[in-house]
């Protein structure tokens, strides 16, 4: 993806202007017409919800760096490329507003290693309704299939 650093800077600057309290990233990983979704553990926030791999952006970290780290931490997969920016959405964390920036990525797929989730599925687009997914996350996944 060209100008990824510039895009990252622009998105981060806009979030600051919008007084967003925290930033997050999400990685849509597609393979054989399916998307990888992970289920949050029962003792976590949003228990039982399926989501794409992702998480918070650390202080001083760029969006691409956060994507690379989060994909590896949550799946064990190594990021090969960030292919396309999808869009963002905001939500309330209980500690303020968080903006999640979602991207379609390519990874080196191997054995999955779950650390923060208790299940995963490779779901086809027409199977998404079978899983407990927030409306915002479902919209992001749908956009990735387009």
Image (cartoon, rainbow, N blue to C red):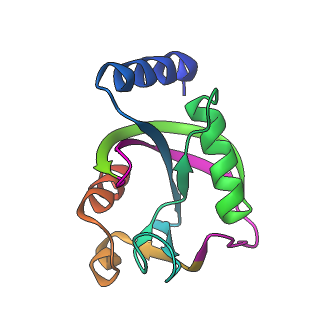
Q: In the displayed image of the protein, which residue is found farthest to the front?
A: 95
Nearer to us in this view, 104 or 114: 114
24, above or below 53, in the image: above
> Which residues lie in the magenta part?
93-117
Q: Quadrant of the N terminus?
A: top right
Nearer to us in this view, 146 or 116: 116
Residue at 30% across / 51% down in the picture?
92
> Residue 21 appears at what percent x and percent y?
40, 35
Quarter of the figure with residue 61 = top right
Nearer to us in this view, 51 or 47: 47
Quarter of the figure with residue 88 = top left
Q: Please state if 142 lies on the left or on the right of 45 as rendered.
A: left
> Residue 48 appears at what percent x and percent y?
42, 81
Magenta residue check for 100? yes
Looking at the image, can residue 108 be seen? no
> Residue 100 appears at what percent x and percent y?
40, 44
């Amino acid at each position: 993806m060209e100008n990824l650093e510039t895009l990252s800077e622009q998105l981060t600057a806009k979030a600051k202007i919008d007084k967003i309290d925290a930033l997050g990233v999400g990685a849509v990983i597609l393979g054989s017409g399916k998307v990888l979704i992970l289920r949050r553990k029962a003792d976590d926030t949003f228990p039982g919800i399926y989501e794409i791999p992702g998480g918070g952006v650390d202080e001083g970290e760029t969006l691409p760096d956060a994507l690379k780290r989060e994909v590896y931490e949550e799946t064990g997969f190594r990021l090969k490329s960030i292919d396309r920016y999808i869009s963002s959405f905001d939500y309330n964390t209980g500690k303020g507003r968080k903006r999640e920036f979602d991207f379609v990525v390519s990874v080196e797929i191997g054995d999955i290693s779950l650390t923060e989730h208790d299940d995963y599925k490779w779901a086809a687009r027409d199977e998404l309704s079978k899983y407990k997914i927030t409306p915002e996350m479902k919209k992001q996944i749908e956009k990735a299939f387009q």
